[in-house]
Image: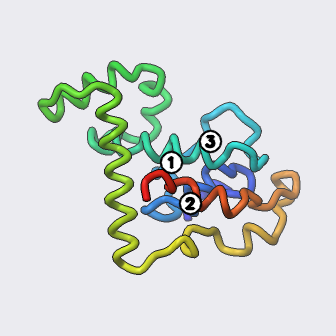
Amino acid sequence: MAAYEPRAIKGTGVTYATSPMGADHIAGNTIRLSLKHNAPEGQAALSQKAQYTVPIYDYLGLCLFSMGVLGAHREILCQLVNAQLGTGYGIEELQALARNTIQWERAFNQAAGFTKVDDRLPEHFTETPNPAAENAVFDVPEDELDNVHQDMA
Protein backbone atom coordinates (compact mmCIF):
# COMPACT_ATOMS: atom_id res chain seq x y z
CA MET A 1 0.00 0.00 0.00
CA ALA A 2 1.28 3.43 -0.90
CA ALA A 3 2.14 5.87 1.87
CA TYR A 4 -1.15 7.80 1.74
CA GLU A 5 -3.05 7.09 4.97
CA PRO A 6 -6.59 5.86 4.13
CA ARG A 7 -8.00 6.89 7.52
CA ALA A 8 -6.89 10.48 6.94
CA ILE A 9 -7.49 10.64 3.17
CA LYS A 10 -10.64 8.55 2.85
CA GLY A 11 -11.20 9.14 -0.86
CA THR A 12 -7.84 7.57 -1.55
CA GLY A 13 -8.81 4.83 0.90
CA VAL A 14 -11.86 4.12 -1.28
CA THR A 15 -9.53 3.88 -4.26
CA TYR A 16 -7.23 1.52 -2.34
CA ALA A 17 -10.21 -0.71 -1.59
CA THR A 18 -12.03 -0.66 -4.93
CA SER A 19 -9.47 -0.04 -7.66
CA PRO A 20 -8.81 -3.01 -9.93
CA MET A 21 -5.11 -2.25 -9.37
CA GLY A 22 -5.44 -2.57 -5.60
CA ALA A 23 -3.99 -0.19 -3.05
CA ASP A 24 -2.00 1.96 -5.44
CA HIS A 25 -1.91 5.75 -5.11
CA ILE A 26 -1.73 6.22 -8.87
CA ALA A 27 -5.08 4.48 -9.37
CA GLY A 28 -7.11 7.48 -8.21
CA ASN A 29 -5.57 9.64 -5.52
CA THR A 30 -7.87 12.29 -4.05
CA ILE A 31 -5.36 14.17 -1.90
CA ARG A 32 -5.29 17.31 -4.06
CA LEU A 33 -9.05 17.85 -3.87
CA SER A 34 -10.35 20.53 -1.54
CA LEU A 35 -12.55 18.83 1.05
CA LYS A 36 -12.46 17.41 4.56
CA HIS A 37 -10.39 14.33 3.80
CA ASN A 38 -11.13 12.43 7.00
CA ALA A 39 -14.93 12.72 6.72
CA PRO A 40 -16.61 9.73 5.04
CA GLU A 41 -19.23 11.75 3.13
CA GLY A 42 -18.75 12.03 -0.60
CA GLN A 43 -15.48 10.10 -0.69
CA ALA A 44 -16.76 7.22 -2.84
CA ALA A 45 -17.95 9.60 -5.57
CA LEU A 46 -14.62 11.46 -5.53
CA SER A 47 -12.71 8.19 -5.77
CA GLN A 48 -14.88 7.04 -8.66
CA LYS A 49 -14.23 10.27 -10.57
CA ALA A 50 -10.49 9.98 -9.92
CA GLN A 51 -10.39 6.30 -10.91
CA TYR A 52 -12.28 7.02 -14.13
CA THR A 53 -9.85 9.83 -15.03
CA VAL A 54 -6.47 8.17 -14.35
CA PRO A 55 -6.52 5.91 -17.45
CA ILE A 56 -6.50 9.00 -19.68
CA TYR A 57 -3.15 9.99 -18.19
CA ASP A 58 -1.96 6.39 -18.45
CA TYR A 59 -2.68 6.43 -22.20
CA LEU A 60 -0.15 9.24 -22.50
CA GLY A 61 2.39 7.81 -20.08
CA LEU A 62 1.96 10.89 -17.91
CA CYS A 63 2.65 11.00 -14.20
CA LEU A 64 -0.42 11.25 -12.00
CA PHE A 65 0.87 14.56 -10.65
CA SER A 66 0.37 16.17 -14.07
CA MET A 67 -3.35 16.07 -13.23
CA GLY A 68 -2.73 19.15 -11.10
CA VAL A 69 -1.74 21.06 -14.22
CA LEU A 70 -3.91 19.46 -16.89
CA GLY A 71 -7.02 18.66 -14.85
CA ALA A 72 -8.53 22.10 -15.40
CA HIS A 73 -7.57 22.06 -19.10
CA ARG A 74 -9.32 19.04 -20.49
CA GLU A 75 -9.15 20.39 -24.05
CA ILE A 76 -5.33 20.31 -23.87
CA LEU A 77 -5.53 16.76 -22.55
CA CYS A 78 -7.66 15.82 -25.58
CA GLN A 79 -5.13 17.44 -27.90
CA LEU A 80 -2.28 15.51 -26.27
CA VAL A 81 -4.11 12.18 -26.48
CA ASN A 82 -5.11 12.79 -30.08
CA ALA A 83 -1.56 13.76 -31.05
CA GLN A 84 -0.17 10.65 -29.33
CA LEU A 85 -2.76 8.21 -30.69
CA GLY A 86 -3.65 9.83 -34.02
CA THR A 87 -7.32 10.07 -33.01
CA GLY A 88 -9.95 12.79 -32.85
CA TYR A 89 -11.37 12.14 -29.40
CA GLY A 90 -13.29 14.68 -27.38
CA ILE A 91 -13.43 14.54 -23.59
CA GLU A 92 -16.59 12.39 -23.66
CA GLU A 93 -14.84 9.72 -25.72
CA LEU A 94 -11.78 9.84 -23.45
CA GLN A 95 -13.96 9.43 -20.38
CA ALA A 96 -15.71 6.48 -22.04
CA LEU A 97 -12.34 4.88 -22.85
CA ALA A 98 -11.23 5.38 -19.26
CA ARG A 99 -14.44 3.81 -17.90
CA ASN A 100 -14.03 0.89 -20.33
CA THR A 101 -10.47 0.40 -19.14
CA ILE A 102 -11.62 0.14 -15.52
CA GLN A 103 -14.46 -2.17 -16.60
CA TRP A 104 -12.03 -4.49 -18.44
CA GLU A 105 -9.66 -4.55 -15.48
CA ARG A 106 -12.50 -5.37 -13.08
CA ALA A 107 -13.79 -8.10 -15.44
CA PHE A 108 -10.31 -9.62 -15.46
CA ASN A 109 -10.23 -9.55 -11.66
CA GLN A 110 -13.70 -11.09 -11.42
CA ALA A 111 -12.65 -13.88 -13.79
CA ALA A 112 -9.68 -14.45 -11.47
CA GLY A 113 -12.10 -14.91 -8.54
CA PHE A 114 -12.16 -11.46 -6.93
CA THR A 115 -15.50 -10.34 -5.44
CA LYS A 116 -16.80 -7.33 -3.51
CA VAL A 117 -15.34 -8.94 -0.39
CA ASP A 118 -11.96 -8.02 -1.88
CA ASP A 119 -13.04 -4.38 -2.21
CA ARG A 120 -12.26 -3.69 1.43
CA LEU A 121 -9.32 -2.34 3.38
CA PRO A 122 -7.70 -4.49 6.06
CA GLU A 123 -9.61 -4.38 9.37
CA HIS A 124 -6.76 -2.47 10.97
CA PHE A 125 -7.91 0.67 9.13
CA THR A 126 -11.56 0.30 10.12
CA GLU A 127 -10.89 -0.63 13.75
CA THR A 128 -7.71 1.16 14.87
CA PRO A 129 -7.92 4.96 15.13
CA ASN A 130 -5.10 7.05 13.71
CA PRO A 131 -4.12 9.61 16.37
CA ALA A 132 -2.36 11.75 13.74
CA ALA A 133 -5.70 12.10 11.88
CA GLU A 134 -8.00 13.17 14.70
CA ASN A 135 -8.35 9.49 15.72
CA ALA A 136 -10.06 8.74 12.43
CA VAL A 137 -10.84 5.23 11.25
CA PHE A 138 -11.76 4.30 7.70
CA ASP A 139 -15.53 4.49 7.98
CA VAL A 140 -16.79 4.92 4.44
CA PRO A 141 -19.87 2.65 4.43
CA GLU A 142 -19.47 -0.71 2.70
CA ASP A 143 -22.52 -0.10 0.50
CA GLU A 144 -20.77 2.98 -0.89
CA LEU A 145 -17.67 0.88 -1.61
CA ASP A 146 -19.90 -1.65 -3.37
CA ASN A 147 -21.44 1.09 -5.52
CA VAL A 148 -18.23 2.75 -6.75
CA HIS A 149 -18.31 0.57 -9.87
CA GLN A 150 -21.94 -0.57 -9.69
CA ASP A 151 -23.02 1.34 -12.77
CA MET A 152 -20.50 -0.72 -14.74
CA ALA A 153 -21.81 -4.15 -13.74
Q: Position of residue 108 (x, y in %)?
A: 33, 69
Q: Label 1 amino acid?
A: Gly
Q: How far is disc 3 from disc 1 in space, using C-alphas?
A: 9 Å
| CB contact under 8 Å: marks 3 and 1 | no
Quote the CA–CA distance across marks 3 and 2: 13 Å
Whether the residues at callouts 3 and 2 have beta carbons within 8 Å, the answer is no
Residue 55 lies, in percent from the top left, at 36, 45
Q: Label 2, label 1: how many angstroms apart (C-alpha)?
A: 8 Å
Q: Identify which residue is drawn at 34% across, 75% down.
A: 111
Percent position (x, y) of residue 142?
68, 63
Quarter the N terminus occupies: bottom right
| Residue of label 1 | 28
Quarter of the image for the C terminus: give it.
bottom left
In-image side of 43 versus 28 (left or right):
right
Q: What residue did someone put label 3 on?
A: 31
Q: Are marks 2 and 1 in contact (CB under 8 Å)?
A: no
Task: Specify which label sits upstream in the sequence, 3 or 2.
Answer: 2
In the image, what residue occupies the spot 18% across and 32% down? Answer: 84
Check disc 3 and report its element: helix, strand or loop. Answer: loop
Q: Amino acid at mark 2?
A: Tyr
Check the image and name the residue furthest to the bottom.
Answer: 113
Task: Give the residue pinned by disc 2.
Answer: 16
